[in-house]
């Protein structure tokens, strides 16, 4: 890992405190003489190719720009900060995330079985689900929190889901009736520490697979915890489900839920971090979680190494993460930002040995390191940029045999990098600080 003079100073602090402090020294955080600052002061942004991306930061706070119809989505993003992490319950559950971790505002996305069809869609406010498994995928945990308009609706959802799990959906195979396929019925169980929970265990005898699910109504919320084990260890599933449900109920008590009538007035940009992200042009793919601002706890649900990044957030004082076609991390200061980037760089090398660091970065943007190479799905490049106290993460992939430009994010990466840098510069010139 390459380190600058200031990064080595932060590293020394991190080592001395065993990655357990919530930030570094105030002197390092405010030191204006970092190498990256010197490099950027003389860099001319006028010649950068930014394509069709907007380079002028939009101060959504000053404009009093409100969520409107996206209010329920933002509420789900806020909720992520109050959803537990599976690796806090079992340290081996660190792999996963991906499309199974998400904000949802539709019944069919929040609920399994026929419960979504039986509910009035207007009774659903929002929800967040996190998913993790262990290294060999033999153990899995899913934790979800869904919010509804009333306690009565939440209690009805729990009842419907619990009863639905006890339905036998197994069918004998026509060619060999001795083979039964499908989903066996779940057997109700009790969780001694959570009397309000409706829990059940399902067992696939031939496969040795066992799952336990707990459903708990709390106010207008439904907490769902699922655990699966491929070795038939039903005691493990009971233990982690009960501990996870208890921890989730405790954390949920701290969630400052927005009154339903005020969701449309939620602000779009917390502490003006989103304003620094790249943004989208027309035609680029995006989903519900592709325009968001999270706190450190909320963002860890999406991180590929949550236990390590959790400590890195603490050491570097990272308190905001925005995602809009790039991921922007706000750290405590310039030295912490450089340390953050280089730690991420070391993680990239360790996790993706097929990616090799580039000798030159696109458009020679300062404070930036990039890696590229051939991966299973195509050609990929990943870049990390430092500007002041901020770190930006951008990536692009050209799928094998791809013929659709909209699926080739590698082709736009140089322009997105340029846009990212220009937005960093202009946001500082505009004095866009905390709300």
Image (cartoon, helix red, strand yellow):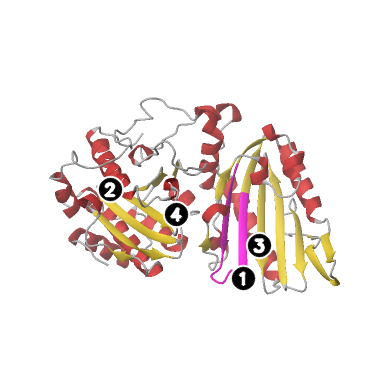
Q: Which residue is mark 1?
A: 138
Residue 341 location in percent, x, y? 30, 57
| Secondary structure, magenta segment, majority class | strand
Which mark sits nearer the N-terminus, 1 or 4? 1
Query: For the point 28% across and 39% down, which residue is it?
Result: 423
- Label 1 – label 3 distance at C-alpha: 11 Å
Badge 3: residue crowd in 10 Å (few <14, some 14–19, many ≥20): many
- For the magenta stretch, what is the residue range? 127-144
Label 3: state its secondary structure.
strand
Nearer-the-camera pick, 214 or 110: 110
Whether residue 185 is in magenta: the answer is no
Nearer-the-camera pick, 344 or 407: 407
- Label 4 – label 3 distance at C-alpha: 37 Å
Q: Which mark, by number, is residue 227?
A: 3
Q: Which residue is mark 2?
A: 389
Which mark sits nearer the N-terminus, 4 or 3? 3
Q: Is residue 143 visible?
A: yes
Which mark sits nearer the N-terminus, 4 or 2? 2
Badge 1: residue crowd in 10 Å (few <14, some 14–19, many ≥20): few
| Residue 382 occupies quadrant | bottom left
Q: Nearer the viewer, mark 4 or mark 3?
A: 4
């Amino acid at each position: 890992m390459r380190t600058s003079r200031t990064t080595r100073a932060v590293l020394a602090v991190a080592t001395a405190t065993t990655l357990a402090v919530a930030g570094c020294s105030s002197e390092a955080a405010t030191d204006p003489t970092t190498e990256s600052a010197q490099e950027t002061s003389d860099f001319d942004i006028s010649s950068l190719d930014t394509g069709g991306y907007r380079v002028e930061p939009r101060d959504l706070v000053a404009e009093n720009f409100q969520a409107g119809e996206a209010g329920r989505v933002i509420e789900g993003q806020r909720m992520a900060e109050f959803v537990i992490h599976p690796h806090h319950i079992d340290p081996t559950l660190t792999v996963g995330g991906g499309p199974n971790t998400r904000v949802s505002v539709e019944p069919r996305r929040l609920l399994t079985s026929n419960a979504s069809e039986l509910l009035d869609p207007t009774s659903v406010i929002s929800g967040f689900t996190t998913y993790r498994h262990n290294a060999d995928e033999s153990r899995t945990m899913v934790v979800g929190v869904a919010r509804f308009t009333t306690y009565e609706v939440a209690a009805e959802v729990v009842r419907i889901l619990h009863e639905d799990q006890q339905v036998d959906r197994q069918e004998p195979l026509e060619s060999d009736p001795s083979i039964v396929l499908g989903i066996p019925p779940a057997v109700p169980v009790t969780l001694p520490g959570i009397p309000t929970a409706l829990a059940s265990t399902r067992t696939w005898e031939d496969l040795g697979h066992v799952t336990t699910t707990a459903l708990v109504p709390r106010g207008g919320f439904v907490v769902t915890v699922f655990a699966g084990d491929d070795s038939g260890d039903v005691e493990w599933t009971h233990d982690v489900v009960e501990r996870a449900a208890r921890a989730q109920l405790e954390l949920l008590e701290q969630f400052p839920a927005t009154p339903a009538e005020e969701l449309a007035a939620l602000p779009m940009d917390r502490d003006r971090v989103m304003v620094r992200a790249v943004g989208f042009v027309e035609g680029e793919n995006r989903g519900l979680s592709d325009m968001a601002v999270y706190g450190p706890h909320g963002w860890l649900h999406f991180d590929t190494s949550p236990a390590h990044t959790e400590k890195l957030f603490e050491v570097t004082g990272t308190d905001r993460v925005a995602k809009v076609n790039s991921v922007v991390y706000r750290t405590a200061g310039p030295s912490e930002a450089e340390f953050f980037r280089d730690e991420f760089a070391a993680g990239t090398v360790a996790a993706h040995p097929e990616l090799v660091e580039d000798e030159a970065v696109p458009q020679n943007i300062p404070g930036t390191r990039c890696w590229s190479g051939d991966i299973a799905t195509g050609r990929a490049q990943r870049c990390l940029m430092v500007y002041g106290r901020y770190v930006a993460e951008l990536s692009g992939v050209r799928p094998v045999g791809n013929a659709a430009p909209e699926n080739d994010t590698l082709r736009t990466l140089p322009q997105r990098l340029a846009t990212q840098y220009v937005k960093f510069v202009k946001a500082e010139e505009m004095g866009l600080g905390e709300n």
